[in-house]
Image: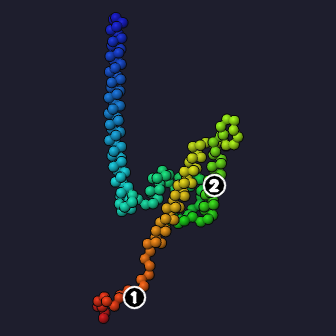
């Protein structure tokens, strides 16, 4: 076989292989796009189904989606063992314990200082960021509880100042 013929065959076979790879990549991209659209539609339907279809779920669910971290994960990251009841505001001791744990972990996980500068720690920026996000998640949960309690207090009906439950202008009951 001559050299030009061998080079032409190699070039042809190479272009066939590359063409098939591009075709398969295009098909995979189309499958991914369809799957992404279906996931988005399912997510929107699921968000509307929570809490009777209004608001996209409970406050805790909304906060978890916004912060991409559950309350349990946040407590685990901060080594926060206080077991406050759900839907109750924390006590002063719980807040103080969380802040103390946060400050300790934040300082411990501080990234090293740049060369030529003093300060910093031996930790990692990634872990320090997780500590910050955990505190934000816990505080967001507490803020959500505070808002819900405030809303509940604002919407409680005030006592009726008219007196008896059966005013005089309503028809008498069967016992009269």
Describe the colour scheme in one phrase: rainbow
Classify residue 12 by image quadrant: top left
> Residue visible at 57% across and 43% down?
126
Q: Secondary structure at mark 2?
A: helix
Give the labeled residue for mark 1.
164
Tell which of 38 and 115 is nearer to you: 115
* Residue 124 horizontal side relative to residue 28, left or right: right
> Residue visible at 47% across and 59% down?
60
Tell which of 159 and 26 is nearer to you: 159
Q: Secondary structure at mark 1?
A: loop
Q: Is residue 148 above or below residue 100?
A: below
Counting residues from the N terminus, which is met first, the one under dot 2 or under dot 1?
2
Residue 101 has which mark?
Answer: 2
Q: Is residue 117 above or below residue 66?
A: above
Q: Is residue 40 above or below residue 146?
A: above
Structural crowding at the residue carrying mark 2, measured as other residues with C-alpha within 10 Å and reported as few (<14), some (14–19) or many (≥20): some
* Residue 70 horizontal side relative to residue 7, left or right: right
Q: Quadrant of the C terminus?
A: bottom left
Residue 100 in the image: x percent, y percent? 64, 56
> Residue visible at 32% across and 41% down?
34
């Amino acid at each position: 076989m001559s050299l030009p013929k061998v080079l032409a065959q190699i070039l042809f076979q190479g272009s066939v292989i590359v063409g098939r790879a591009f075709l398969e990549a295009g098909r995979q991209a189309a499958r991914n796009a369809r799957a992404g659209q279906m996931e988005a539609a399912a997510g929107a339907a699921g968000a509307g189904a929570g809490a009777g279809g209004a608001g996209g779920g409970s406050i805790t669910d909304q906060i978890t989606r916004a912060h991409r971290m559950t309350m349990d994960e946040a407590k685990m990251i901060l080594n926060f063992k206080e077991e406050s009841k759900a839907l109750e505001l924390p006590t002063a001791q719980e807040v103080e314990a969380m802040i103390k744990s946060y400050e300790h972990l934040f300082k411990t996980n501080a990234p090293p200082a740049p060369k030529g500068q003093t300060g910093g720690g031996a930790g990692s920026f990634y872990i320090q960021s997780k500590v910050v996000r955990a505190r934000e998640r816990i505080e967001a949960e507490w803020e959500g509880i505070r808002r819900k309690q405030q809303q509940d207090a604002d919407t409680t009906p005030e006592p009726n100042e008219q007196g008896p439950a059966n005013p005089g202008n309503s028809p008498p009951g069967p016992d009269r």
